[in-house]
Image: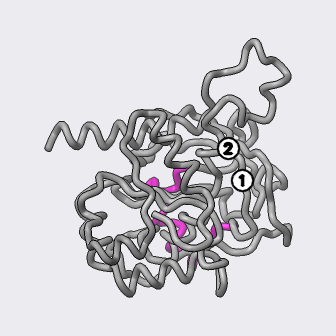
Amino acid sequence: MRVGGTNRDIDAARCLEDLGVNVEVVHLNDILRRRNLGTYNGLIFPGGFAYGDYVRAGAIWAKRLQSFMKEDLRQFADSGKPILGICNGFQVLVETGLLPGFERFDEPQRAALAGNESGRFECRWAYVKKNLQSKCVFTTMASDVVRFPVAHGEGRFVVESDETLKKLIENNQVVFQYSDGVGKLAHGSYPENPNGSTMDIAGVCSPSGTIFGLMPHPEDAYWWYQLPDWTSSPSNRPTYGDGRAIFESMLDYIEKGLTRG
């Protein structure tokens, strides 16, 4: 799904098309007219600067969803279909209440993606460590440590209270944390943690694991030629980057659901 200011929709669609998926990039207004969200098997909120990120990142898009699509989204989420939010999409999922999503879609907002501690836009490659206990359906095929680029000005994950953070940890909803290349957590150190996120959090999921948001861009780490160091050893370069596993995992979950259905 896209709106004015979205700029990563085609990138995400191309990744899924490479996996043989029939993808439709659809504007929010088209969904509102058709009321056909339930006909899709998965949903991605891509990166960009929705509505110019006025007010704060993701806020306007989120309020439009809450105002005009609350029940449609609730039904989609309750059906167990996967929802992925990347960067600006992550911000939208947090602003709507779909994440952390402890109890219900319209619960009070319990987290936010605040401005980077550096005070500037961060565009760099980052390592993230996977929580092996997480139920996240988007990381089942990902390695323990993966590398994706970040590109954001408001990526610092913060929570409303210690109770919220405790619940996220107890539920294993923290999916990715910023780390070094061998999986040692950044512990807030810059630039390994590029934005100052609480507990180095780079991505979280819903309690069920079917809704996932992350600040790094897996669609920008999908093809070999996107990787920052492939020219140093072109003969040994991989065919794909770590980002492919996110989309593979999503597809695998969908296919298994269709088989069960």
* Quarter of the image with the C terminus in it: top left
Give the residue furthest to the top: 235
Identify the residue shown where x is 73% and y is 57%. 151
User: Is 139 located above or below residue 160 in the figure?
Assistant: above
User: Is 131 located above or below residue 43 in the figure?
Assistant: above
Q: Which mark is residue 150?
A: 1
Instruction: Give how far across and how far down residue 1 sits, in percent.
Output: 45, 63
Residue 172 lies within the magenta run: yes
Q: Residues within 10 Å of mark 1 (few under 14, many from 20)?
A: many
Instruction: Give how far across and how far down residue 144 sits, in percent.
Output: 57, 34
Q: Which mark is residue 148?
A: 2
Q: Looking at numbered disc 2 in the image, what kind of residue is underneath it?
A: Phe
Is 224 on the left-hand or right-hand side of 72? right
Callout 2–callout 1 Cβ contact below 8 Å: yes
Is 164 on the left-hand or right-hand side of 107? right
Give the residue furthest to the left: 261
User: Which span is picked out in magenta?
Assistant: 156-175
State the image quarter where residue 6 is shown: bottom right
Q: Gap between marks 2 and 1, in whole Å?
A: 7 Å
Identify the residue shown where x is 60% and y is 37%. 222
- Asked if residue 169 can be seen in this view, the reply is no
Secondary structure under badge 1?
A: strand
Residue 10 lies within the magenta run: no
Q: Residues within 10 Å of mark 2 (few under 14, many from 20)?
A: many
